[in-house]
Image (cartoon, helix red, strand yellow):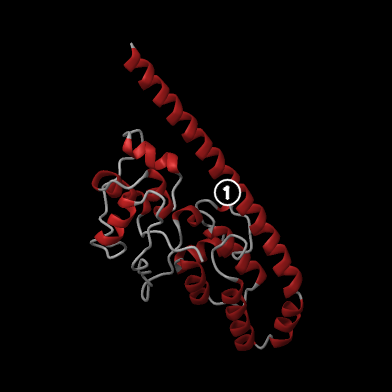
């Protein structure tokens, strides 16, 4: 089973480059990075400068483990303590910055497909405010011309289980149990469509990441060749 990566992989890699004699391969493997990223850090070619994060202080590595790696370049570092995942228990639902622009589309879809769901339930599910929901409902939202109803599950704003639970709860309260049953019978087809959309989105994300990685590698090699040429002169 693949071990987890450090909580801050780039910052951890930067610290290991500056403070140990581990190979680039060992650092890249432990931090879950591409070796060219580590080499760029070592050569100060990284576009973003990272403040080093000590994995020994955080408990993710021990000095004994680092020394094993320094003594044997083929040794794979073992994480001593997996990063602690912080669970939010209060406040609105957290949504990644990259997905926040999709919230209005998800809210519009719920308002159209499940009007029985209360504003409070929508706010908890999507992580939004009642003012935003009201503005989308009465079409006074500042960006209403560009809002297109889309299933919040396919947008990655919530899970299918969370949505189904709220739909069932709202349907029961509104006396729409039969209708909820009809929706459930369509679950398999809907789930298949969601999986297809997610697979397509994942493929696009992977392709973009690979293209960026190739471009970064090419830039690094070009910079290295230019530096070598300057040295020869």
Q: Check disc 1: other Cα within 10 Å, few if <14, some if 14-19, many if 20+.
A: few
136, above or below 174, in the image: above
Residue 85 placement, left or right of 58: right
> Which residue is located at x 32 percent, y 17 percent?
231
Q: Residue at x 50, y 52 (%)?
A: 142
**Residue 29 % position (x, y):** 43, 52
Position of 170 relative to 60 (above/below):
below
* In this picture, residue 104 sits left or right of residue 64: right
Check the image and name the residue furthest to the front: 71
Where residue 43 sits, quadrant-wise, is top left
Residue lying at 51% horizontally and 72% vertically, measured from the top left:
125
- Residue 208 is situated, as x and y percent measured from the top left of the image, at 57, 43
Q: Secondary structure at mark 1?
A: helix
Observer able to see residue 136: yes
In this rendering, the answer to whether 51 lies above or below 130 is above
Residue 99 place in picture, x, y as percent:
50, 56
Quarter the C terminus occupies = top left
Can you give x and y, in whole percent of width and height, for residue 138 in the image?
A: 56, 63
Toward the viewer: 161 or 224? Answer: 224
- Residue denoted by label 1: 205
Query: In front here: 131 or 6?
Result: 6
84 or 152, which lies in front? 84
């Amino acid at each position: 089973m693949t071990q987890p990566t450090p909580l801050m992989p780039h910052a951890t890699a930067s610290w290991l480059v500056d403070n140990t004699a581990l190979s680039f391969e060992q650092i890249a493997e432990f931090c879950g990075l591409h070796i060219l990223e580590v080499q760029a850090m070592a050569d100060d070619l990284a576009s973003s400068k990272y403040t080093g994060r000590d994995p020994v202080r955080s408990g993710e590595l021990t000095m004994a483990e680092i020394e094993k790696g320094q003594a044997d370049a083929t040794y794979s570092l073992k994480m001593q303590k997996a990063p602690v995942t912080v669970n939010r228990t209060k406040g609105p639902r957290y949504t990644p910055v990259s997905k926040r622009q999709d919230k209005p589309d998800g809210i519009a879809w719920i308002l159209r497909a499940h009007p029985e769901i209360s504003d409070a339930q929508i706010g908890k599910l999507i992580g939004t405010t009642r003012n935003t929901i009201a503005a989308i409902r009465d079409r006074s939202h500042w960006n209403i011309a560009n809002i297109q109803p889309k299933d919040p599950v396919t947008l990655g704003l919530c899970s299918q289980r969370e949505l189904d639970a709220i739909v069932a709860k709202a349907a029961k309260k509104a006396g729409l149990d039969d209708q909820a049953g009809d929706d459930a019978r369509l679950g398999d087809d809907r789930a298949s469509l969601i999986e297809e959309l997610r697979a397509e989105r994942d493929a696009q994300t992977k392709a973009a990441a690979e293209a960026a990685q190739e471009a970064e590698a090419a830039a690094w090699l070009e910079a290295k060749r230019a530096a070598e040429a300057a040295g020869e002169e």
